[in-house]
Amino acid sequence: MGPQRQREIDWHKRMIMRKIPTLLRAESRNSLAVFILRVVIGILTMHHGYQKLSHFEKMKSDFLDFLGLGSSVSLALAMIAELFCPMFIIPGLFTRVATVPLIITMSVALFKMKQGDIFGGGESAALYLLGYFCLLLSGPGRLSIDRIFAKRGTVRIVSSC
């Protein structure tokens, strides 16, 4: 390898090393963390919603009648929240609005069905509730569709990125 090629390699290394602090900024790490939270918690919640959909007939008679609407309606509301809200949360579209039905669903699951037992049977509901509450407070982050709309100035919703 000639000296010219070595200088080019050294120059590229210096340029890469200059970019690393930019990638490690707190705002970038926070956005990445919120993105990971949105995707993971969304996929896990969709799995629960799919389980409710696939076992609807078995579950509808035993499901908690939350608002006095009947256990079938309560199950359908929980299933809709767990299936469709994550479809908005994962890409970061209307994130704060989409977390509200899930916060309600997880609150009912934790406090009504599991009697607030966060260290026993209600542990997973408590973790989901905490994750969705964090998303409600933080918003979708920079890696989201909401952020793209906010940059363009086309949509101004509840979420600010």
Image: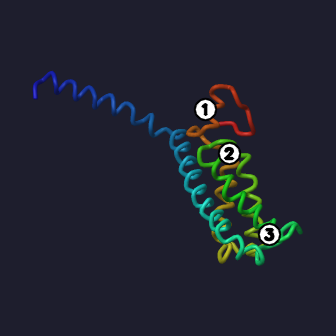
Classify mark 1: residues with Cα within 10 Å, few (<14), some (14-19) or many (20+). Answer: some
The image quadrant that residue 11 belongs to is top left
For residue 72, the mark is 3
**Amino acid at pointer 3:** Ser
Q: Residue at x 64, y 68 (%)?
A: 54
Q: Which residue is mark 2?
A: 95
Hey, what amino acid is under mark 2? Thr
Q: Quadrant of the C terminus?
A: top right
> In the rendered structure, which disc, 3 or 2, sits on the residue that comes first in sequence?
3
Residue 44, percent across and down? Answer: 58, 61
Q: Residue furthest front?
A: 57
Q: With 91 as the anchor, is 153 left or right in this view?
A: right
Residue at label 1? 148
Residue 117 spot, x, y in % from top left: 71, 75
* The N terminus - image quarter: top left
Question: Mark 1 or mark 2, which is nearer the start of the sequence?
Answer: 2
The residue depicted at 39 percent of the width and 36 percent of the height is 20
